[in-house]
Amino acid sequence: MSLLRISNLSLSIAQIPILHEVSLEIAPGEIVAITGESGSGKSMTALATIGLQPEGAKVEGRIELDGTDLLTLTEPQMCSVRGARIGMVFQEPMTALNPVQTIGAQVAETILQHEAVSRTEALDRARAVLNRVGLPAARFPLSRYPHQLSGGQRQRVVIAMAIALRPHLLIADEPTTALDVTTQARILDLLKDLTRDFGMGLMMITHDLAVVAGMADRIAVMQNGRIVEAGPTAQLFSAMRHPYTRALFEASTHEVDLPPAPPPEPLLVVRNVVRTYRQPRTRLFGARPEVHAVDDVSFTLHHGERLGLVGESGCGKSTLTRAILGLEPVQSGTITVDGAPVWTGLRPNFEVRRKMQVVFQDPYSSFNPRHRVERLVAEPFNLLPDPPRGAAREARVAEALVAVGLKASDASRYIHEFSGGQRQRIAIARALINDPTMIVFDEAVSALDVSVRAQCLDLIADLCRRRPLSYLFISHDLSVVRSITDRVMVMQAGAIVEQGPTQQVFSNPQHPYTQALLAAAPKLPDMKKASHGT
């Protein structure tokens, strides 16, 4: 018997079709993954299921939960369904949580909204649910706030809110996209355990086939609002009858063709860098403990070299990056670019800063949405003592846009008019416009779906062939780092625990932490097996 049955679901907004006769079933205790590129209709299917489709959307078909057609319910009736019978885990936990409420209050709120219990009882039940998702009372009291937790811990709080009333159906929309590989593995294991223990149905929304390859019972592949292929996971991977499914698989395993690195010539030299933060006192007159975010780190990035940096959240990657970019000082050690220090006395060296650029994880949040692309791409000109103006400025912007595969006419558009992959291309154009000596890619492709990610990686490799490009590539996605770097460093608890040629480190890791990272990374089935029967 099906727990959820979606029959011929069609949805349009302002007469524009979004979903086309989508049909899907989920049984109790079953995990069904919906996968596809951004814009394929995955999230809209989930939102329609929970009754959160955009206002004014026209919906046709049936969405039956335990035999009840949810599309016939009023909004007050759907409010009683959400949280009690259907739970939702969103992609970004920080936006799903209230920053001014404690985690205990937020989990208890779900219980108080649906059941006539006292606040004390609701908090007791919230404590039990938080324990169940791996946040024990000794380390995570109910009085904690979201900003005091890591990304993986915040996602566990969101999961606790979603399962507080043991719903029949749990929807998880890209729940692990921004998480490192070990945290991702723990969250996926938690979702599997909860599905088994509670007998829930789980609808897993993801763009990454590798994430669900070993987790889902069945997979549905969506393209342009339609399910183009569906079936049991092993069967789908062994057949892959639809060309789009094969394209997704190939994009997930995509490897770029990097040109050979030139002979070593030091560019960025980091020597014995230490960065500590003082924590609040644990006793009234006690000393303030110190946390070593970066602990005696040393390495060299050569001209024309592509260097990777991997590690779990909180290992010190971001702190080290800020120090390299001259955004915050270090307690001891030196950082130089072409022999010049990043810091001179108490101030950053702006001559050195001009030689470095950064591409951030979320391009949309790194741009001012009120400015046109021309102004956004030209922002690094502000670092120059004599920036180009007039026609020369326009020509430089056009050249940068064309270099990343966009059109010169795109300079007159606004950032919201572009897709996620196009926005990241604009971010790369901004980073290139001053011909920097070095670029820092900070999780630059982790938020992109697999096909767009492959395109951006190919773009970076093509730029390496056309110009002397040196970069530090920071990512939690080990498959990406393996493809786009010459050497890799592994960071744990503020220290570099292993470094060497990328293929050597990935093929024969020496440090137990590196071995644990590689073991936790999601893996697709063998390509030869996946190709069998096509």
Image: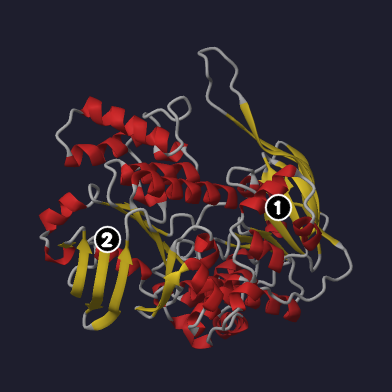
* Residue carrying label 1: 349
Left of 194 or right of it: where is 257? right
Residues packed near mark 2 inside 10 Å, few (<14), some (14 to 19) or many (20 plus): few
Q: Is residue 281 above or below residue 167?
A: above
What distance separates the C-alpha of mark 1 from that of mark 2? 67 Å
Q: Quadrant of residue 36?
A: bottom left
The quarter of the image holding the C terminus is bottom right
In percent of the image, x 23 and y 68: which residue is there? 54
In percent of the image, x 11 and y 54: which residue is there? 76
Q: Quadrant of residue 446?
A: bottom right
The quarter of the image holding the N terminus is bottom left
The image's colour scheme reads secondary structure
Mark 1 is on which residue type?
Asn
- Which of the marked residues, 1 or 2, is nearer the chain's N terminus? 2
Q: Nearer the viewer, residue 112 or 227?
A: 227
Mark 2 is on which residue type?
Met
Residue 1: assigned label: 2
Left of 369 or right of it: where is 315? right
Residue furthest top as drawn: 285
User: Do the CB atoms of the residues marked 1 and 2 lie less than 8 Å apart?
Assistant: no
Q: Is residue 356 visible?
A: no
